[in-house]
Image (cartoon, grey):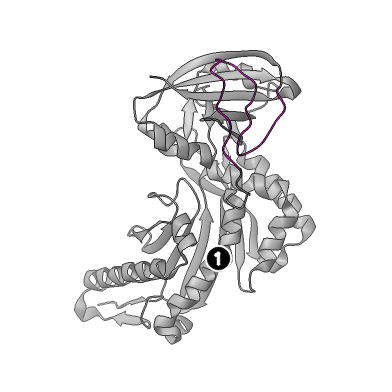
Amino acid sequence: MQQQQFVGLTMPVFTAFGWAGEETALNYALAQLEEFIARLHASLPRDIQTRLPFFGLDRNSQSVYLAANKEPATGGGYIAFHARPLSLEMQMVFNDKMILATAWKAADSDPARWLKLLRDLDTGWSMRIQQMQIDEETGAAAFYQDLFKDELTRLDVEGAQQLASRAAFLNGEPKWVVPIIYSRRVTSDQAAMMGVRIINVLTEWVQAVMPLYDFHTRKDRRPTTKARPKSPRAVTAPVSTPLAVMEALPTIEGFSYTAELKSLHIRRGFVNLTASHWPFFAPNARATTRPVLVIYDDHQDKDCAVWHLADNDLARVVLSPAVHDWLEDNFNADDKIQITASKLADEIIEIRLDPVA
C-alpha cells in the first residue's frame, strides 16, 4: 500500500507505513497535530493566549490553528499550521470580509506603518493578497487573481500604498473580498532536525507576527477611559466615548427602525435594514457602501459601514469587530434591536443601536 508522510509535529518527521493502513496512519498523524497545537498554545505568552484563545484541528484541511473565534475563518484573523510531506508552513490569515474591512482600512490609512511592520519580520516571510469574487446566489468566494504574491522584501513604499488603496477599495465592493495571507515555511528535513524544539521556534514566529495582527485588527490602538452616560433622547448628537471625542453636530434628518436578529446576524456581525432604507445612505447612484458612525452602549465606532446588497436590494449595517463583540455579548436569536439613523453635518451618518425590551 502507498505510504503516507507527515511533518511538522512535536517529534521528528515520522512515516506511517502501508502495513498500518492509510486510514490508521492518517488518524495517528492528526492526533499528533492536535497534541502539537495544544503544546504550542500552552507555550505562548499569556497576552497572545488571550487574543487567540481558541485552538484545534481542522480535519478538512488537515491543519491546526490558533484563532480569536470558535470558527477560525470568521470574527477575526487566525494562524494555521499546514503539515505537508515536504514542508511545514505557518500562515496568518485574514479572510472574513468584515474583519478585512478593518484590516485594509488600517493599511490604507497608514501604509508607511504597515510597510514598517512587514520589514520588521525576518527574511523568509512572504505575503499573498488575493482578489476573490463573491457569488451573489451562494455567497461563496472564488479565486479571481493575485494582487501580490511574493516575499515581503519585494514590496516598496509606493507598492504598499498602491496595494493597500486598491485592496481597500475592492474589499468595500459587495462582489469582491480581498484576503491577506502572511506565511513562512521550513522544509520537512529542517522540521525533523528541530525535534521538540520546533515548539520554541514556532512560538517565536507567532510572537513576530502579532504586531501585524494587532495592526490589522486595530488591537494596537491606545485604550481610553469609559464614556459618560448617553442621553435618553431618541436621536442625539454623538457622545464622548473611549474611541473618539467629537463636537456635537446638528441633526438634519433621520429614521428609526426595529430589526429582528437571527443567529446568523449575531454570528457574522450585521443588522439588516430594508430596500427602502438604502437611498438614505447612498451618496450617489453608483455607490454600494457608505461608512457610518455607530453609537452603542455609550461607545462610538467609526469602522462600521452600510452595504447595499445587489442580490436582494437590502441595506445592511456591517459591524466592526468591537461592535460585533457587543452584539454577541448582549443579544440572542429572535431579539429585536432598535436602529436610529441620523444625518449630521459634514455628511456624517450616525446609527444608534439599542436593545428593545
Q: Is residue 139 visible?
A: no
Q: Residue 178 location in percent, x, y?
A: 59, 47
Secondary structure under badge 1? strand
Q: What range is drawn magenta here? A: 225-248
Judge whether 8 appears above or below 325 on screen.
Answer: below
**Amino acid type for the residue under numbered disc 1:** Ser
Residue 88 in view of the camera: yes
Seen in the image, is 138 located left or right of residue 56? right
Which residue appears farthest toward the bottom when viewing the image? 193
| Residue 265: percent from left, percent from top | 42, 32
User: Residue 62 versus residue 254: which sits nearer the camera?
Assistant: 254
Spot occupied by residue 24 in the image (x, y as percentages of width and height): 22, 72
Name the image quarter holding residue 286. Answer: top right
Few, some or many residues within 10 Å of mark 1 (<14, 14–19, 20+): many
Residue 71 in the image: state x and y as whole percent. 39, 49
Q: Quadrant of the N terminus?
A: bottom left
Main SS of the magenta part reads: loop
Q: Nearer the viewer, residue 344 or 187?
A: 344
Residue drawn where x is 63% and y is 73% of the image: 122
For the point 45% across and 63% down, the residue is 46
Against 356, residue 165 (above or below) is below
Q: Is residue 94 above or below residue 353?
A: below
Q: Is residue 19 above or below residue 241?
A: below
In this view, the residue in front, 200 or 146, is 200
Quadrant of the image for the C terminus? top left
Which residue is labeled 1 in the image? 183
| Residue name at image x 58 percent, y 24 percent | 351
Q: Residue at 48% across / 83% down in the picture? A: 190
Residue 227 colored magenta?
Answer: yes
**Relative to 83, 100 lies left or right:** right
